[in-house]
Amino acid sequence: MDDGTPEKYLNKIEKKYPNIIINHSVDAERKSKEIENAIRTGKEVYTNTIPLSFWRETIEKGSDIFLLWEDDIWLTANINVDDCEKLMKENNVNLLKVRWWGNENTNVGTRIKLSESIEEIIPAVNRWAEQIVKNRFYLNSILSKLKLIKSTFFLQLYTYYEVGGVFFNKDYWLFLWPKNMTKIEEMIQLGKAAEWKRKHSSYKFTKFINESGRSTFLTSASGAYKDSIGFSMTFVNYYINEEWLNGNFNILENFPENYSIDSIYNILEQASDVKCNPESWRKWTLNFQNHFVSIGASPLG
């Protein structure tokens, strides 16, 4: 699913992987041109429109079991997709986590081995979690105001959910993302997941025994990530993408670990562009990483 990648990058991907199918959102061409115009003029760009209906329509047309991957995630081990699909169908599984940021606070419950590589989690989530995350009777508002609940309380609900790096049962994903959604708010998915669990107790939640995917803290697809540090992620991505396009970026550098800080730093240093100063970028990536580490994630992603 593409929402605005410049055509020259997609062309290289299609040439390298001729069997790939790329579906484009209705705004993809416009967003692509906005990025190209930003690079040409030197002006920042960020279009705050999320293709929710596009995601839903694409998934509705897909298989009953699917792997939802994102641009900032990569596999660190081989997985057999057919075996995963078979296990999920035979065991009535809602989701199978491939990666979870190394954060065991998002896998709460008793574990039962289903295969050599996959285990079921019998959730041990707080019985009031659904009511609190949905703010029923203003519970979340009241408890938060009285400082009787921490934001980390909601991590346990990720036992039922993860944004990406997950095999999903299609019906489950569609339930979590209702048609009337107009913005991304993960509290909605967490509340819907808890509701599904309450109504459909026979469905299982599973994960790989060993985490087999990782997420990066070095970049972001969104130009919105610049905050008070003052730099443009649009231009950071542009210089990295150009190095890749021209065959100068080793995509397996440091694999299965993340790219080294130096590999990105050197690209930005050579670009010598005030809009993506390498020191500002380094500060941003540390802040990004520290946010997730503070709630239990691995510093490695």
Image (cartoon, helix red, strand yellow):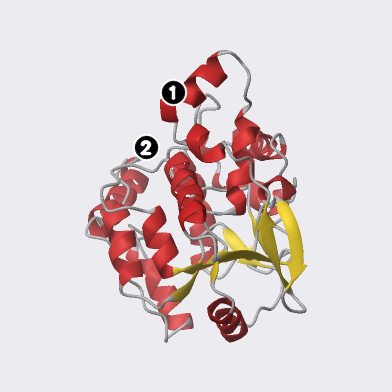
Task: State the residue lying farthest toward the top.
Answer: 146
| Residue 224: quadrant of the picture | top left
Q: Nearer the viewer, residue 122 or 86?
A: 122
**Does 118 sit above or below residue 54?**
below
Instruction: Name the residue located 36 percent from the left edge and 68 percent from the top edge.
Output: 59
Which residue has dot 1 on it? 138
| Residue 174: quadrant of the picture | bottom left
Q: Is residue 9 visible?
A: no
Mark 2 and mark 1 in contact (Cβ < 8 Å)? no
Q: Amino acid at mark 2?
A: Glu
Q: Secondary structure at mark 2?
A: loop
Which residue has dot 2 on it? 44
Q: Nearer the viewer, residue 160 or 276?
A: 160
Distance from disc 1 to disc 2, alpha carbons, whole Å, reads 39 Å
| Residue 272: quadrant of the picture | top right
- State which quarter of the image contains the N terminus: bottom left
Q: Secondary structure at mark 1?
A: helix
Q: Amino acid at mark 1?
A: Tyr
Q: Nearer the viewer, residue 89 or 287?
A: 89
Comparing labels 1 and 2, the label whose residue is closer to the camera: 1
- x, y (%) of residue 195? 46, 49
Q: Nearer the viewer, residue 300 or 279?
A: 300
Instruction: Name the residue located 56 percent from the left edge and 20 percent from the top edge.
Output: 143
**Does 55 sit above or below residue 180?**
below
Residue 27: mark: none
**Does 75 sit above or below residue 293?**
below
Instruction: Name the residue located 51 percent from the left edge and 17 percent from the top edge.
Output: 142
Instruction: Name the residue located 44 percent from the left edge and 23 percent from the top edge.
Output: 138
Circle 2 packing at 10 Å, graded few (<14), some (14-19), many (20+), is: some
- x, y (%) of residue 219? 56, 48
